Image (cartoon, grey):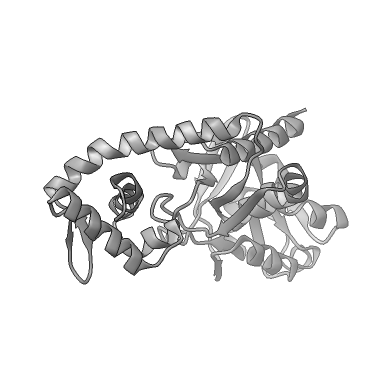
């Protein structure tokens, strides 16, 4: 017969995730094993902790009270375990990060080899998805997003020094269609647009000059939801694109793309790594955050 302490992790996972399958995946067991251990815990306590249907699992009144009492205690156990491991220990274990493809290519991939050399015991999983992902439901340790996309109950740490937005087009396109002289001229051009996967909204284009900023809804017959495809379309001479400068540095240097309206380039706030406020910071995540902040400081110098 399992002890109460042995059964508590099953209860905490199901209560937090609201799903037996997700709890099983996080615990590394099968859903029937989770169900059996929850039943054993309910038998020991003599109360029903969850209301179960074929479609959902939700806490009963008794289960909600039990979770409110147990969850802080289990967090303290995790903190104590991590503190002990940190005494002379190296960061280790699976670290799951959700982030957009743009952040992965700009900020993480160029430094991935160095991170692996420094922390060989950390198994890093990068889950690239442009739509916003729930950290708890997805069992992620942290996420990387632009600051404007973050919820208020998240701790956000900057990992870059902002991003410069630039307009680019191929020499072939500019030879055929001419170069715009002002942002308003873009309304008569083929603009390559981006649609946010989560909200479904089209991204406006941003401009700044002499400290004055403005946003403009440009026109165009091509819309994408992936930055790489927008760059490919610009290289093919299909229109003008507004992208972060870091994604087109090589193409600009080689002359495959030309910057348009450079005097109207604008600055974006940049990317942040975020995690829920109040959650204990495991050593593996602390190491990743410090590593990314170190890259940011190097960039600033």
Image x and y of residue 272, in percent: 55, 39
User: Which residue occupies 71% across, 55% down?
Assistant: 168
Residue at 35% over, 49% down? 6
Compared with residue 292, is residue 179 higher up or lower down, i.e. above or below? below
Nearer-the-camera pick, 101 or 70: 70
Position of residue 285 relative to residue 190, above or below, is: above
Image position of 249 (left or right of 106): right
As drawn, 16 above or below 169:
above
State the image quarter where residue 138 is shown.
Answer: bottom left
Q: Which corner quadrant holds the N terminus?
A: bottom left
List x then y, in percent, for residue 182.
Answer: 64, 48
Task: Tell me, yes or no, if residue 84 can be seen here.
Answer: yes
Q: Position of residue 226 (x, y in %)?
A: 58, 63
Instruction: Please tell me how many numbered marks the rendered image carries.
Output: 0
In the displayed structure, 238 sits above or below 28; it is below
User: Looking at the image, which is closer to me, 233 or 285?
Assistant: 285
Instruction: Say whether residue 280 is visible.
Output: no
Left or right of residue 172, residue 123 in this image: left
Q: Is residue 196 shown left or right of residue 136?
A: right
Side of 109 where 70 appears, left or right: left
Q: Position of residue 295 (x, y in %)?
A: 72, 36
Q: Residue at x 60, y 56 (%)?
A: 125
Say which residue appears at 61% left-offset and 29% top-offset. Answer: 87
Outermost residue to the right: 254
């Amino acid at each position: 017969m399992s002890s109460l302490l042995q059964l508590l992790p099953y209860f905490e996972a199901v209560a937090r995730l609201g799903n037996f399958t997700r709890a099983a995946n996080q615990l590394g067991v099968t859903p029937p094993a989770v169900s059996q251990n929850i039943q054993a815990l309910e038998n020991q306590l003599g109360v029903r902790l969850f209301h179960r249907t074929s479609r959902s699992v939700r806490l009963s009144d008794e289960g909600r009270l039990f979770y409110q009492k147990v969850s802080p205690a289990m967090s303290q156990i995790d903190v104590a375990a991590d503190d002990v491991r940190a005494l002379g220990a190296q960061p280790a274990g699976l670290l799951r990060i959700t982030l957009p493809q743009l952040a992965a290519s700009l900020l993480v991939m160029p430094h991935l080899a160095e991170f692996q050399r420094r922390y060989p015991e950390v198994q890093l999983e990068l889950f690239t998805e442009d739509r916003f992902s729930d950290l708890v439901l997805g069992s992620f340790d942290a996420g990387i997003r632009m600051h404007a996309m973050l919820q208020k109950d998240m701790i956000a740490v900057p990992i870059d020094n902002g991003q410069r937005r630039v307009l680019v087009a191929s020499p072939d396109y500019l030879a055929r269609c001419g170069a715009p002289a002002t942002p308003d001229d873009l309304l008569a051009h083929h603009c390559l647009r981006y649609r946010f996967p989560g909200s479904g909204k089209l991204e406006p284009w941003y401009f700044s000059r002499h400290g004055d900023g403005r946003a403009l809804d440009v026109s165009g017959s091509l819309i994408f939801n992936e930055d790489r495809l927008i760059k490919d379309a610009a290289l093919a001479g299909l229109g003008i694109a507004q992208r972060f400068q870091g994604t087109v540095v090589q193409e600009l240097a080689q002359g495959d793309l030309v910057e348009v309206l450079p005097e109207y380039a604008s600055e974006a706030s940049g990317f942040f790594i975020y995690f829920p406020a109040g959650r204990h910071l495991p050593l593996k995540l602390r190491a990743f955050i410090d590593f990314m902040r170190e890259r940011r400081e190097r960039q600033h110098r």
